[in-house]
Amino acid sequence: MAPAKTTGTRASSRGSASAVKKTGTSMATKSKTTSKTAPSPPAKKASTGGSGSRKRTIQEEPDEDESEEEDVEDDGEVESDNNYKDDSEDGDEDDDEEVEDDSDDDDFQSSDNVRIRGGGSKKGKASTTGATKPSSSNPAKKVKTSSTTTSAAPTKKPSKKQQQAKPSPTKTFLVSPLKIPRPKGGHQVADAIQPATLEFLRDLKLNNDREYMMLNQERCDEAKADFLDFIRMVKEGLLEADPDVMDQEPKQSMLRIHRDIRFSNDKTPYKDHFSCHFSKGGRKTIAAGYYFSIGANGESFAGCGAWDVGSAALSRVRNGIVNHSDRFQAILATDEIKRITGGNSGIDALRAGNSSLKTGPKGFDKDHPMIEFLKKKSFAIGRSFTDEQVVNEGFLEEVLSTFDACVDFVHILNDWIG
C-alpha cells in the first residue's frame, strides 16, 4: 500500500484529488509508471499558510524574477536537508534522536532553530505535514539559517585570553641596558631560574604599569611557571630539613605580584620580583618561616625569620629573648649563620628591618645587655644572590643550604610567637 500513499500525495499537489480514491493493483502500477515516465516536478517552497510544503506545481511560464527567487530558496532547503543527513549515521529513522543531541551544541542555542529541527520525525519535513497557521516568520528561512550554521566546520571555543584582543601600545616603553647572563655551557639548567624569567622582571621594573603587563602577559605567565617549578624543588628539599613546614602546592606558597597601594605613596601596581614563603602555618600565618624571592640586577634573596611582628607576638618574643638570651645568642653565632651573613654573628647577623625603636621598649630595662635585640620589630637572617648565581647550576643547593642554617633560629622564634 506504500505506493498508493505516494501517488495520493503527488496527486493532491497537482489538484487531482479523485485519483487518490482508486484502489487495487492498477493504482500501484500507475504510480510506478508515472514515476518512471514523467519527471517529478520541482519541490515548491513551503509557505507559511499553505498545505504541503516543498512542492511546487508546474505552472504556465512564471515570471523570470519569481522563478529565480524560488529556485534560490529551494536550493537552501535542499542544502538544509543534506546537512542534517550528514549529521546522522543511521538515516531518517534516527532523526529525532539526532535533533535532541544537537540541541545542546553551542551552534544551536537559538530557540527558533531548535524548534524547526525538532518539529517532526523527518528532518526537513517538519513543516510539510498539513496546513499551518499563517505567521510572521517563515519556517523555511529558519531551516536555511540553521543549515548555514551546521555547514560551518566546528571550531574550538576561544579562551578568555583569545577573546581579549591584545591592545596596541599607546606609549613607548623603556628598554633596559642590563644584560642577564646565560648559564655556563649555553644550555638550560634544571636546578636554576631561567634567564627569560629575570629578563621579564628586569623589564617590568622599568615599565611598571598595567598596559605593559597586559601586552606582556604571555611572558609573565611563562616566568611565573618557571618560578613555580623552582618552588616545588625548594619545598621538597626544605621538608627534609624542617618537617614542621606545611606541605602545600607551590601556588599556595607563592606571594602575589600585585602591590597593595591603598596606603602607599608609590602607586606602581606590581612588585619587581617573584617571592614565596614557607612556614608551619602557610604563607598567611604570623609564624616565623622561610622566604625566597628572585629579581634582576642582584635582587634575589633567601632568608628566614619573622618580619614586622605584631604587638602581641612581639611582646612574647622580647620576653623570650630576655629569658633565653644565652641560647638565642648561641644560635646567631654558629658557623652556618656566619657563612650566609658574610661572617656576621649576633645582632649584626639580623637584617635591619623596616623600623625599630630608638630606645628600649616599655617594661624593659634600658641598660639590659640584650637591649639592641629588644629594640627590633623584625628578626630575620638571609643572603642575596647575583644574577649569575641564579641562572647557573647549583643555585637550588645554595637556597636550601641557606634554609638549613636557619632551622634552629626559626624554631626558637616560633616557640615564643606560638
Image (spheres, grey):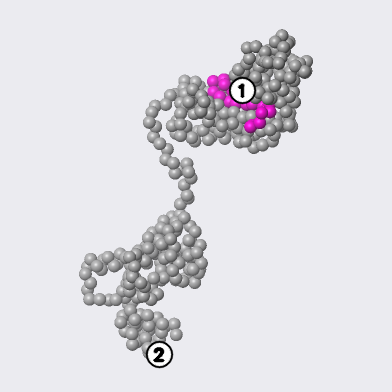
In the rendered view, would you say 269 is above or below 73? Answer: above
281 relative position to 172: left or right: right
Does residue 297 belong to the magenta stretch? yes
Does residue 62 belong to the magenta stretch? no
Q: Quadrant of the C terminus?
A: top right
390 relative position to 315: left or right: left
- Quarter location, residue 303: top right
4 relative position to 269: left or right: left
**Residue 277: horizontal and vertical position, in percent?**
64, 29
Name the residue rendered at 57%, 28% in the picture: 274
Provide the residue span drawn in magenta: 283-301
- Quarter location, residue 226: top right
Q: Which residue is mark 1?
A: 301
Is disc 2 placed on a helix, strand or loop? Answer: loop
Q: Looking at this view, is 103 or 66 the one in front? A: 103
Name the residue rendered at 42%, 26% in the picture: 173
In the rendered view, would you say 21 is above or below 263? Answer: below
Name the residue rendered at 73%, 31% in the picture: 244
Give the CA separation, mark 2 to mark 1.
99 Å
What amino acid is labelled 1 in the image?
Phe
Of pointers 2 and 1, the one earlier in the residue sequence: 2
Q: Residues within 10 Å of mark 2 (few under 14, many from 20)?
A: few
**Residue 12: horizontal and vertical position, in percent?**
34, 81
Q: Which residue is mark 2?
A: 23
Name the residue rendered at 49%, 59% in the picture: 104
**Residue 404: horizontal and vertical position, in percent?**
72, 24
Q: Looking at this view, is 224 or 47 the one in front? A: 47
What amino acid is labelled 2 in the image?
Thr
